[in-house]
Image: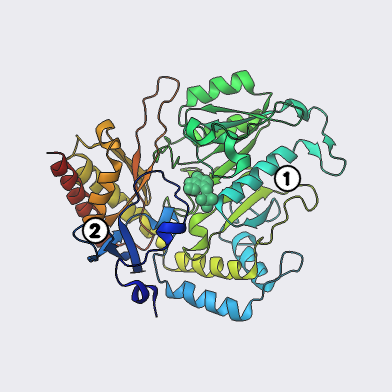
Amino acid sequence: MSAAGVLGSTRSWFDRDVQFDHYGADPLPFGCTGARGIVQQFVELAGGQAGRSFDVLDASGGYGSACLGAGSEVIAEALATAVRQAGYVTDEIASAERSLLLERLFGPGGLFADRFPAADYRVSGRNSGSEGMELALRLVLESRFDRRLLRAVPGAEQRDIVLGFEGAWHGWSGGLLPLLNRRHYRVGLPAVAPEQFGFSTDHIPFGDVEAAQEWFDRNGDRVLAVMVEPVQGDAGILVPEQGYLRRLAALAEQSGALLVADEVLTFAKTGRFFAMSDDEGPIPTDITVIGKSLGMGALSTSMVIARRELGVRPTGTVSTSDLRPLTCAVIRAGLDHVVGEGLLERSAEVGAQLGRLLRERVVAPFPDLYREARGVGLLHGIELTEPTAARIGELRNCMIRNGVYVEFMSGAGRRSHGLRYVYPTMRVAPPLVVSADDVETIAARLAAGSQALRELAA
Ligand SMILES: Cc1ncc(COP(=O)(O)O)c(C=O)c1O
């Protein structure tokens, strides 16, 4: 019997009792009994309406990961075939599935070959975005010493700063903590020691060329790496102006620093595979980490793509999950489908329409609730006003009861260099399979949810 059939009512939502609470706020009083495409079946769990089930349009993709929505036949088929046929060899043994995927991506004419030709780059697979970023940090740190002798490369010790950005989020794991910019993520947790081979972190505001230039003028000879989200996600969907990322890449290169792009969130969400791009084409990076959509909503997986000269000490970062055949089969089937159906190109068009609708139908009529909408491709954010930021719980309930699911980002908060405060931001990032009609409905439901919040206050 399906999960929906087993539960069917409000009787037993045991996950609520035993799963960690990561949010520290009242849990949303809804359960999900199933989903197809971008339509999810929700049920009210409490209050007078308990047991009522209703459809909710998904404008989130499950933290930006389910790029094909729910129930993709292509992925179901790939998974079933791989379970039966692909085996499970680790990276100690070459695998036909792994070879096929990597050739499709990095071989001659491959999907990523213009940016990451196999002659210059190598890859590794991890379980999640956090783990991918963790491996990226290890590659950065180990670039300072001779991996065989475990001794400093002469002159490398002086490179001891990793530059991050105000409001940055790169994942939850321990090594990444110093790179996260908000105090509430870091206080009381391990800090990085300033000893030989230790490193410190610094943060500058994202998108401000002068702040970057000034920082490199002061610290250029000490910077080991720059870690950047090309569109800052948790900071509030901050999209830099044309030219900023290329300028940042040039500053990193001139000062001999490694450039790490965290494309865990942006992968396949900005109308192209990679957001480290501009009108001139790909912006070169030393390490790029992709995740979320890469797993097609069926698996949690990430990939670290690094220049060949970067590496780690033998067996230092072995992982049980490194590009297992089943994972490779799902990724290959999913990406072939995305390309074959022209989903990226279509998402750029539908995304432009979504951006317009958010500005005209959601932000403009509700200036008391929202500051602005911004975004690119299918990655959009609506920044809340200060009073709305204090009512996120109510806002979420209003949106869901009006049939649309969105998620909320912390916002960068206070920034330096005279830049304005960034309040929490509603992320509107539906799966790539969203249609032009769907985005009309999403915008209409967001407006209805906004109206409901306004009326609650009245
Ligand atoms: C930019 C960025 N990097 C890394 C991560 C961490 O990915 P995961 O949650 O898969 O560990 C996230 C997740 O939200 C993210 O948005």
* Residue matched to label 2: 403
20 left or right, relative to 177: left
Residue 90 shows in this picture: yes
For label 1, the crowd category at 10 Å Cα-Cα, with few meaning under 14, some 14 to 19 and many 20 or more, is some
Percent coordinates x, y for residue 276 in the rendering:
51, 44
Q: Identity of the amino acid at label 2? A: Gly
* First-in-chain label (2 vs 1): 1
Percent coordinates x, y for residue 337 in the rendering:
47, 69
The N terminus lies in quadrant: bottom left
Between 102 and 428, the residue placed more toward the observer is 428
The residue positioned farthest toward the right in the image shown: 149
| Picture layout, residue 235 above or below residue 406 | above
Between 277 and 302, the residue placed more toward the observer is 302
Mark number displayed over residue 310: 1
| Picture layout, residue 103 above or below residue 197 | below
SS state under label 1:
loop
| Picture layout, residue 190 above or below residue 62 | above
Q: Identity of the amino acid at label 1? A: Leu
Q: Residue at x 42, y 34 (%)?
A: 241
Between 457 and 236, the residue placed more toward the observer is 457
Mark 2 or 1: in front is: 2
